[in-house]
Image (cartoon, grey):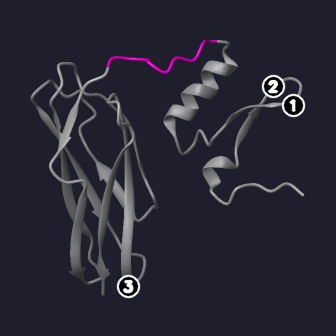
């Protein structure tokens, strides 16, 4: 009877006192949606221009791990360079599955400095993979989408 979208991010919604939908999105998978829900619940006005923005440069947003033994952990680094005039703050990093983990410094990045995101992939089974990492930070293009691909043999 209810035709929910197949995308899980649109299967969660916030209702008002009259059971009318006032916001759609999964706050577990998107920190911006979480902030929106909290602002609505707390009665705060939501602002699209929140916070101080900066700019970031990434040499490559798509890295291939090539072919490797599927039982061996693989690690690559994405370098985010703060090219703006304000501090770069990474609010959250989400991966498309539990087989991908990301480590990085939680400290704000000064202008002209950079931060390395160390992405570790551990295959659950042999085969081709294509994984997405979402970096939520104070840039206009947030979330930044990073991708790792390869062949676990």
Asked if the stretch drawn in magenta spans residue 47, the answer is: yes
Q: Earlier in the sequence, mark 1 or mark 3?
A: 1
Residue 21 in the image, given as x and y percentages of width and height: 78, 33
* Side of 77 where 89 appears, left or right: right
Element type where label 3 sits in the image: loop
Q: CA distance from mark 2 to mark 3?
A: 47 Å
The residue shown at (36%, 80%) is 128
Q: Quadrant of residue 36?
A: top right
Disc nearest the viewer among 1 and 3? 1
Q: Quadrant of the N terminus?
A: bottom right
Q: Main secondary structure of the magenta part?
A: loop
Q: Which residue is mark 3?
A: 126
Q: Nearer the viewer, residue 94 or 50?
A: 50
Q: Quadrant of the C terminus?
A: bottom left
Residue 9 in the image, given as x and y percentages of width and height: 61, 49
* Side of 137 where 35 appears, left or right: right
- Mark 2: few, some, or many residues within 10 Å (few <14, many ≥20)? few
Q: Which residue is mark 1?
A: 19
């Amino acid at each position: 009877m209810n035709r929910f979208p197949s995308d899980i991010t649109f299967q969660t919604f916030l209702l008002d006192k009259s059971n009318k939908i006032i916001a759609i999105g999964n706050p577990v998978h998107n920190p911006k949606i979480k902030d929106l829900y909290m602002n609505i619940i707390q009665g705060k006005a939501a602002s699209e221009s929140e916070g101080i923005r900066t700019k970031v440069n990434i040499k490559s947003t798509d890295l291939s791990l090539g072919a490797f033994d599927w039982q061996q952990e693989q690690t690559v680094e994405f370098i985010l360079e703060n090219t703006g005039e304000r501090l770069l703050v990474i609010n959250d990093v989400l991966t498309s599955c539990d087989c991908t983990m990301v480590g990085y410094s939680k400290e704000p990045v000064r202008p002209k400095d950079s931060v390395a995101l160390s992405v570790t992939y551990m295959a659950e089974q042999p085969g081709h993979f294509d994984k997405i990492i979402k970096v939520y930070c104070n840039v206009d293009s947030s979330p930044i989408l990073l991708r790792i691909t390869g062949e676990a043999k």
